[in-house]
Image: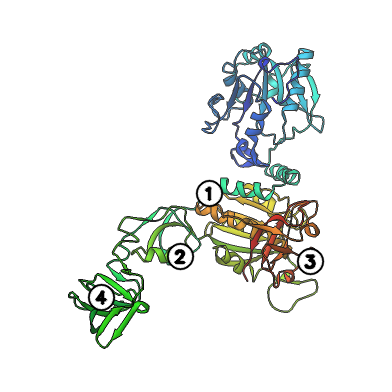
Amino acid sequence: MSSTPANTPSTSANAIILAGGRATRMGGIDKPGLEIGGRSMLDTALAAVAGCADIVVVGPQRDNLKPTIKQVRETPAGAGPVAAIGAALDLSGSAPWVIVLGADMPFLTPSAIDALLSAATQSNTETFAIDADGRPQYLVGVWRREVLKDALSQLDSLANQPMKAIVPTNPTLVAVPDIADCDTPEQVVAARAVAARSATKFTLDEAREGLIARLTPLEPHTAPLAQAQGGALAQPITAAGALPRFDVSAMDGYAVNGDSPWQLRRDIGFAGGARPDGLRSGEAVRIATGAHVPDGTTAVVRDEFATIDGDILARTENTPIRDDIRRAGEDRNVGDLVAQAGTRVTPALRSAAASVEVTHAEVRGPLKARIVMTGDEIRADGPLQLGQTRDSIGPVLPDYLQFYGVEIVDRVHLRDTANGFDETLSNATDVDLVVVVGATGGGAADQLRAALARINATNIVERLALRPGGSTVVAETASNTTIFGLPGNPFAAIAVLAALTPSIVAARTASPPPRRIVGPLHNAAEVATNATRITAARYAPDGGFLGDPHLRTAHLAGLIDRDGLVVVRPDTPDGGTVEFLPLPR
C-alpha cells in the first residue's frame, strides 16, 4: 500500500480479492476486467493492497497477473462471496489480519484501505467501509483471521451464502471515500464519464508514445505495391533481379573497343532496342543512356568527350578517361536487401522495388477509414434551414487524411441521439480507423465517450493538454478498430489530425514513428501562451517559421496561404525551437 500507517505494517495483513461472480446484471461479463480510466477494476483493487505480502485473487484464471499473486477458483464456480473467501483463506498466508475486497470499485485507493486497517487494529474488531449513502459494504473490509476462519466453519455449506451469514454483530464501520461499486452497465458508463472528466490530460509526446505502444498493428497481407501506398512493409523485400540486369551505357555517347581513335560504325544502340553486333578492336558505335552495350565494349565515351572527323571518332584531348558503363548487378544483385520491414510504401520504394523485379510484398495497410460527422445542426448539401450550419470540414477531411496515407472508405452523418454511435462503432469491423468529428466534449450532445464505454473500447488517449484540441479521444475497439474522436471545431479538428494521425498510421502499420520537423519560430514570444498551443504558420524567408498570433478556430480561413502548423510550448522565446506540422497545399 502506498502509505501504510506506522502501527499497521503491511506484514500484519494479507488480502483476498473477489474477482469472479456471475455479474448477472451485466450479462455475465468479466466485470473485474472492465477498464475505467485506463485501468481494469481488478488492477485498481490490486494496487490498493499492493503492500500486502500475500494476495489471493479468486475467480477465473488470469494469465496476465504477476506470478507472486496466488489464484484460486471457488467451488462451484460462481457460488458467491462466502465460498470465494473460503477457497482463498488457507492460501492467504498467516498474517493476523485479512483484507477482503470485491474487484468492482474503480476509484478505490490505497489510502482507503489504510484507513480501514488502521481502524481495525485500533479497535481490534472486524471493520467495514460505509459508502456515500451510509450503507455498510461488507466486501470492503478487514477481518481478524481467526474470527473469519471461525465464521466460515460455523456454516454447513459455503456455497451461495450471503456475506451477512458471516459478518459479526457489532463490527466497526468507517466512512471512506471512493468505494462506489459498479454493478450495472449504467454505473460503468457513469464511472467512465467521471474518470474521463478527471483524467490527466496527455501531452502530445505522451499521446504519441501511447499510440505507438498500445494500438494493435494491422494483420499483414500480400498486395501489389502499387496498391499499398501509405502502408508499410511487413517483411523485408529483396531483389528478385539484378540491377542493372546487364552492362548498360551510363551516358549518351559511343561504345568503343580499345584505345582512341576508333572507326565509327553507323548502327545505333538505343535503350530497349536491338543491341548492335559485338565490337571489334578499334570500332565504335553510337549508343544511348541505358542501352545494352555491345559485346567487346571496353568503355563508353560520352558525347562531350568525343571528337568526330568523318568516320573517325577520337577522345578529345585533356578529357577524363572514364568507362561510363554501369555493370550488371553493381547496384543490386539477386537477394540484396531493398528495404527493411516497417519501411513505408512510397513512390520511391515502389520504383526501387520495380527496378529489381519486385511488384508485390507483404504489407500492413494502408489504413482504411470511415469519417463520421456528428451534429443535428450540420448539413452537407442543399439549402440551410433555420439553425443549421454548413459542413465545412467533412468534405475536406479526405484530402487531409490521404496526405498522411489514409484511404477513405466512406463518410456518414450521425444525428445527436443517446445511442446514435452504438451501431456505428460496434459494426466498424470493415475499416481500420473511424474518424469522428464532434461529440467528444462534455456537453449534452457529446455522446462519443459514453458510446465507447458501452462497447468496452479501450481508451488510449483520454484528453490532450493542447489548445485547441483538448477534448480529443483515441480508443481501440474489441475488433482492433481505432476510434479517433476529433473536436467539432474545424481548426481544432485539423490541428489534432495533423498532430496525431502520423503516429496512428505508424502504430497500425508497425512502422517507425515519423521524424519530426523542427526549427526556430521567429515570433514565438507573441504566439506562446501558458499552455501548449497549435497555430498556423508560414516559412520565414531566411529559414524557420512565422506563426499567427491570433487565429479564429471556427473555420479554416486561417490556413489559407499557410505552409502548416507549429506546436508552441509555454513561454517559448523568439527564435525558440518548435515542431512544424506540414499540411497539404
Disc nearer the start of the sequence (4/1): 1
Please rate how many residues cluster around mark 4, counting C-alpha atoms within 10 Å: few if below 14, some from 14 to 19, many from 20.
some
Mark 4 element type: loop
Residue with the mark numbered 4: 260
Front residue (pair 492, 73): 492
Q: Which is closer to the viewer, label 4 or label 2?
A: 4
Q: Which is closer to the viewer, label 3 or label 2?
A: 2
Residue with the mark numbered 3: 552
Quadrant in which residue 471 is drawn: bottom right
User: In the rendered structure, which amino acid carries the disc numbered 1?
Assistant: Thr
Above or below: residue 84 compared with residue 451:
above
Please rate how many residues cluster around mark 1, counting C-alpha atoms within 10 Å: few if below 14, some from 14 to 19, many from 20.
some
Q: Residue at x 69, y 50 (%)?
A: 450
Quadrant in which residue 380 is drawn: bottom right
Front residue (pair 389, 520): 520
User: In the rendered structure, which amino acid carries the disc numbered 4?
Assistant: Ser
User: In the rendered structure, which amino acid carries the disc numbered 2?
Assistant: Ala
Mark 1 element type: loop
Q: Are circles 3 and 2 on residues that touch, CB within 8 Å?
A: no
Disc number placed over residue 348 in the picture, else none: 2
Q: Which is closer to the viewer, label 3 or label 1?
A: 3
Disc nearer the start of the sequence (4/3): 4
Disc number placed over residue 216 in the picture, else none: 1
Location of the N terminus by quadrant is top right
Q: Which is closer to the viewer, label 4 or label 3?
A: 4
Front residue (pair 4, 206): 206
User: In the rendered structure, which amino acid carries the disc numbered 3?
Assistant: Arg
Disc nearer the start of the sequence (4/2): 4
Q: What distance separates the C-alpha of mark 1 from that of mark 2?
A: 27 Å
Q: Position of residue 206 (x, y in %)?
A: 65, 46
Front residue (pair 95, 579): 579
Q: What distance separates the C-alpha of mark 4 from that of mark 1?
A: 65 Å
